[in-house]
Image (spheres, rainbow, N blue to C red):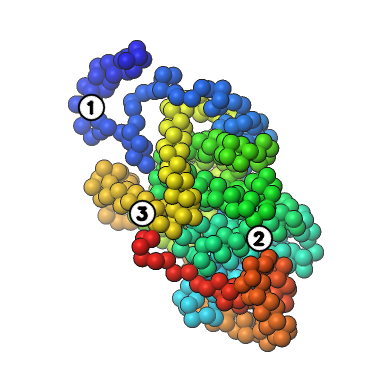
Amino acid sequence: MKKEHHDRKHWERGTLKPWLRTHPERKEEFRTLSGQPVEPVYSEDDLHHAREDALGLPGEFPFTRGVHPTMYRGRLWTMRQYAGFGTAAETNRRFRYLLEHGQTGLSVAFDLPTQMGYDADHDMAEGEVGRVGVSICSVEDMRALLDEIPLDEVSTSMTINATAPMLMAMYIVAAEETGADVVSLRGTVQNDILKEYAARGTYIYPPAESVKLALGLAAYLNEHVPKWNTMSVSGYHMREAGATAVQELAFTLADATAYVETARWAGVDAETFCSRLSFFFDAHSDLFEEVAKLRAARRMWARIVRDRFGIDSPRAQVLRFHTQTAGVSLTAQQPEVNVVRVALQALSAVLGGTQSLHTNSRDEALALPTEESARLALRTQQVIAEESGVANVVDPLGGSYYVEWLTDHIESQALEELHRIDAMGGATAAIEKGHYQRSIAKSAYEQQKAIEEGERIVVGVNRYEIDEPGRVETLKVNPALREEKTRSLRALRESRDGKGVEDALERLTAAAHDGAPTMALILECTRLRTTLGEMSKALEDAFGRYHPSGGAW
């Protein structure tokens, strides 16, 4: 046994154990939020990597310490508050309100019918129009959503997947019609369909066809909207569904690897594709675990791009990511405590080197956020940026024995999971076999069991409860919204070139059926005022609607 480890065990027996006997409320064994055992103290002997290979300098391979040499000393992260509810006009007012209060980027939340390819007047949309995001059915809605917003100055992120080609087409056409230069547009479209089958569920078409649509959109944007990030590979939703930090990291990188391999097979230049790829991670409640996860993510992706794909371009090797605080951690009990949770989670994202950040609002366990709570969530980021001092130095936790050990440990475990996925045939095959789903479900069960048994403390839920919960004013969506949208859709269909729309939809179905590129046809349909639901149905006529087999779950 090394002397350091011997000394640590001696220190633990001589110092910690007697203290525990007089403080029985503390545990003898500690774990991270994801269940990793944590020793009481760490030293240089706990570090496994050669430091020069694992760390380097910020802005240099393997980018463990950050993607830019100066990080936030040169430019702060983009403060991109996620928002969307009701009509496009209502969401536009919220966007302008947030921009007036210092937000630096837009992030659009779409309602479930929009995500699932249904217009607001479809039977499947009843009860859901505008409830968890904005309802967008046509380019007219998109124009209202972006009204008076300088698209050549503000970057926009759109959390949309199955219907990403249609929503992106609406954004492009809206920009064209308002005089913006499409080449100058900046933003990100999530366009990550694989995680929908694994955790979130807003898929429409079978996996292979959906991946082809996603890559077709990416190829079009690479050529015509070169400043746009064509895909944001998301671990966030898998983490929210119950994945551990290790699973979130491994599944996200496995999905990204599958997209790059499929893009190469389809003839898309892998270096260009990787250069426009971004990622989306959760910032959960274990501060050090989240920092370590994000540092490990950069290192792992840089090595995957270099060693697996043979790409030497630093721009392609860099893992750029957006972070959102953990919605699943928010509690309806004592919702004001969520302000503290979000602040600590946001701090972990900043310490981990995020490129953009959304901070959840205190009332989101109850309803969509009010203007006041959304402003407070934005102010949380601004306090971290302007008052805390953490943005003054690059990778301020770098070199911490605990953080470096945890970074190495998370990377090692994530690599083991990646090897398992490779042995199954890659991410798509692993999802079709139900591996992701079973792993996430098992982890979610174990986490909930720990809360119910009191092993994991949630303040206000299973410890420090109060009898009289505070009252919080919540936002309510207009219940007559669907009727209003139905009337506007009827008027749109009556005013457009019906024959032109019909012909364009037929060409779209035929191209999709034949495996031909579809993005140019989707743009043609959009300019003709074809609705989201009509374009989605045209693709469904070619691909079918996907229903997972029971065995996969």
Q: Nearer the viewer, residue 297 or 91?
A: 297
Where is mark 2, residue-wise? 217
Sequence order check: which comes first, mark 3 or mark 2?
2
Residue 98 visible in the snapshot = no
| Circle 2: residue type | Leu
Q: Amino acid at mark 1?
A: Leu
Depicted 219 relative to depicted 26: above or below = below
In the image, taking residue 437 as reference, residue 156 lies left or right, namely: right
Q: Is residue 512 above or below residue 236?
A: below
Query: Answer yes or no: do the residues labelled 3 and 2 have beta carbons within 8 Å?
Result: no
Mark 3, residue position: 438
Looking at the rendered image, the quarter that the C terminus falls into is bottom left
Mark sitting on residue 1 = none
Q: Report the quarter where the N terminus lies.
A: top left
483 is higher (above) or lower (below) than 429: below
Q: Residue at x 28, y 46 (%)?
A: 450
Q: Which residue is mark 1?
A: 20
* Residue farthest along the top direction in this orientation: 3
Disc 1 element: helix
Local secondary structure at mark 3 = helix
Residue 460 in the image, given as x and y percentages of width and height: 32, 49
Quarter of the figure with residue 218: bottom right
Q: Tell me the CA gap for discs 3 and 1.
A: 37 Å
**Whole-percent x and y of residue 106?**
63, 55
Mark 2, residues whose alpha carbon is within 10 Å: few (<14), some, or many (≥20)?
many
